[in-house]
Image (cartoon, grey):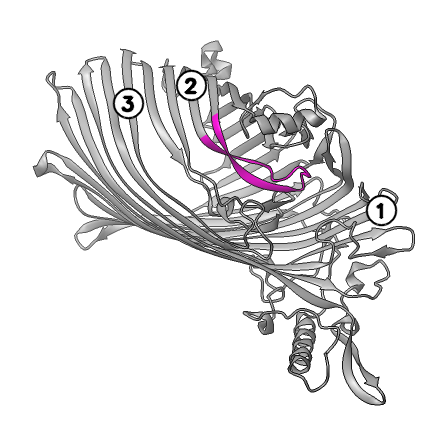
Amino acid sequence: MSLSLGGAYQSQASLNDRFLTYHGGGLDWAAVDDGTRALPAELVGQTVPAVVSSSGVIGTPIYAQSVSNALVLDRLTRAMGPAEFAPYRSSPPLNHHLSAAGGGSSRRLHGLAGYFAGVSYKQDWSFFEDAISSRYQSGTQLKNRYRDTRSLGTVNWSGMVNLAYQPLEDHDLGFTFFYNQNAIDDARLQEDGFERSDPASTFRKFKLAWTERHLSTYQIKGDHTLRKMNDLKFDWLVSLTQTTQDEPDARFFNDIDSGQGPTTGANSVPIPSNPTRYFRALEENNYNVKLDWTVPFANWTRAPGAIKWGLFDSSSERAFEDRAFGYFGGGSYGGDPNRFLTLEQLGLEGVRTNYVRGNPRSLTFLWNRYVHSFDSAYDGQLGIYAGYVMGELPLLDTLRLIGGARYETTDLFVRSESYRDSSVTGLKTNDSSVVQSDVLPSLGLVYSARPNMNVRLSYSQTIARPAFREMAAYFSYDPVINDFVEGNPLLKMSSIDNYDLRWEWFPRPAELVSVSLFYKALRNAIERGDLKQEGDVITFLNRERATLFGLELEARKRLDFFGPPLTGFSLGGNVSFVQSEVQLTREELFNKRQFLPSAGGTRPLYDQSPYVLNLDLSYHNPRAGTTASLVFNVAGPRIAITKLNTEDVYEQPAPSLDLVFSQEIGRQVTVKFSAKNLLDPAIERTYGKNSNLLYDSYSRGVTLGVAVVYDF
């Protein structure tokens, strides 16, 4: 049994009274919304009628319908109730976590049984302020710029049970259950804003959001060796994974101050121009069945080989709903977004009767604030059916051939419904499908120059499928990338030809030296880029062809060969150098050169760094119970968003340095110390690889942690 308890100080968040937060629910600490943010029952499955200003002539069918719609809209608006749109400041406590785990084994029912169970809980806070968020257009023309402050509170807890049973020798059965509950509370303020649409005014953006995720996995498996059938091995696995993601009552409030006080709803206010509340819900179930057989054999020199074959069946179903409620109507709020939705400002203010020649003719509805809904949804199904056969054949004492093929079918379907027309098809309802069969070969040679040295040469073909969201043709705000996104219903699957050559040497146990060359040819690679010239909506696009060539060096060496003082130390790392290339289409190049005359006809592949470096220095002394590691990594600039009329947006290098130290105290207690993100670099995205035009910039801060582990 093991118990662990720890805490951490986050340099930018912990105990900082400038941290942003808002009033949430009573179970936020458990990563569960208690219903505080839930969509009111009156609006579940209910269509919100459009606003009615006039009833029409009294006594007509139009009059009756208009009065009914006005009363329904008033009732639903009031049911939504008041809401906060702006955060307040309050200091969070230290980050903290705790966990417990234990297991054992015994003989049960004439077999050997074992179990392991564990639970963990973690709560973290992070914060940045005085960050920069900006957008450019038409080459280097500033479109908008904001001073950015953001707070994140994260709660994560999980539990796992693992059961194993061996009824007979060579027959193992297992069951695993894993549960994870996660929530992120997000409060954001962007102020001192500039918008080119109204350069004399000042803008603000407020965001309050709660994202709750749940994951449950059930897995049963078996491993069997049949000695009487030439040691035939049969492995099987059946799994079910259930995933949900809820975003209840995500609130966005953008306003403008032109000198007479802040107002909202103006045309120049960024999207959403009216205060808006989002309610999103996602459910997905995934089922997998995997069967594998292995038959060992000996070749003509009695060297061991094997033939393997197997079947795989996977099906996934996803349902997603997005309901947005925008608030319209007049009335001031004094510049405080939290005074925008008060009880007295909701729904109908009154009804005026209009007379003609002294007789009542019609009604005029006088509105305060009222809601208008913008609803979107999509459903997706994915079926993957596959079978493979492969063999490992020793050709010589020093040469092995490994090869085979996988036959795989894909049946992917997405139906999306959006409140606005798709920019790709011009339709509100779109059906997208990919039905495809692929034969994916692989072939490799392994030459053992020495017992501890190998040369590997291989070729394989792989595929990549578009995600449900990438194909769903609906428009929404993505809080992860802080941009609006619209899916592309015309996406295709990607295919990749992989060529690899690797030399590896193992001088001593736990030591490695290797050199690898690799080349990839990609067809229809999926990239994230601008949907339109304006650059305010991101979509997903297939790139017809791309190539990638690289070199990787990897090494791990124990340092005791320098002398006894360095016993227990080891140094390891790897570095990759990659050259990737994508050819721009004629249309892309023409658009780019309208604003950037020197734009080239090629660029690197999306999300591919030209270099990646990982280094670690480790120390392990079992006798003293001491372990320590210093880990450094950095990746070169890589394209985060492809642009149409500006330089592409690059994620700039952000070197990371972490230190972890642990010390055993006696036989039962271990004390651990960690220092993460010691370099604390600026996290920047820029227009162009070598540019001062910021897309956004912020820093994470340093986290110092201490934990105590008790084993008994």
Q: Please provide the residue range marked out in magenta.
A: 524-545
Q: Is residue 397 above or below residue 50?
A: above
Disc tally is 3
Where's residue 489, x and y in %? 49, 45
Q: Of the two numbered discs 1 and 2 on the same chain, state the one appearing first in sequence.
A: 1
Residue under label 3, please give it.
Answer: 443
Amino acid on which disc 3 is placed: Leu
Residue under label 2, please give it.
Answer: 518
Where's residue 458, x and y in %? 33, 20
Rounded to the nearest angstrom, the CA distance separating label 1 from label 2 is 52 Å
Pair 1/2: label in front: 1
Image-quadrant location for residue 393 = top left
Relative placement, left or right, of 301 versus 365 is left
Give the label on residue 202, or none.
1
Residue at 19 percent of width and 13 percent of height: 397
Callout 2: few (<14), some (14-19), or many (20+) C-alpha neighbours within 10 Å? some
Residue at 71 percent of width and 27 percent of height: 595
Amino acid on which disc 2 is placed: Phe
Q: Is residue 112 visible?
A: yes
Q: Are marks 1 and 2 in contact (CB under 8 Å)?
A: no
Where's residue 709, x and y in %? 50, 43
Callout 3: few (<14), some (14-19), or many (20+) C-alpha neighbours within 10 Å? some
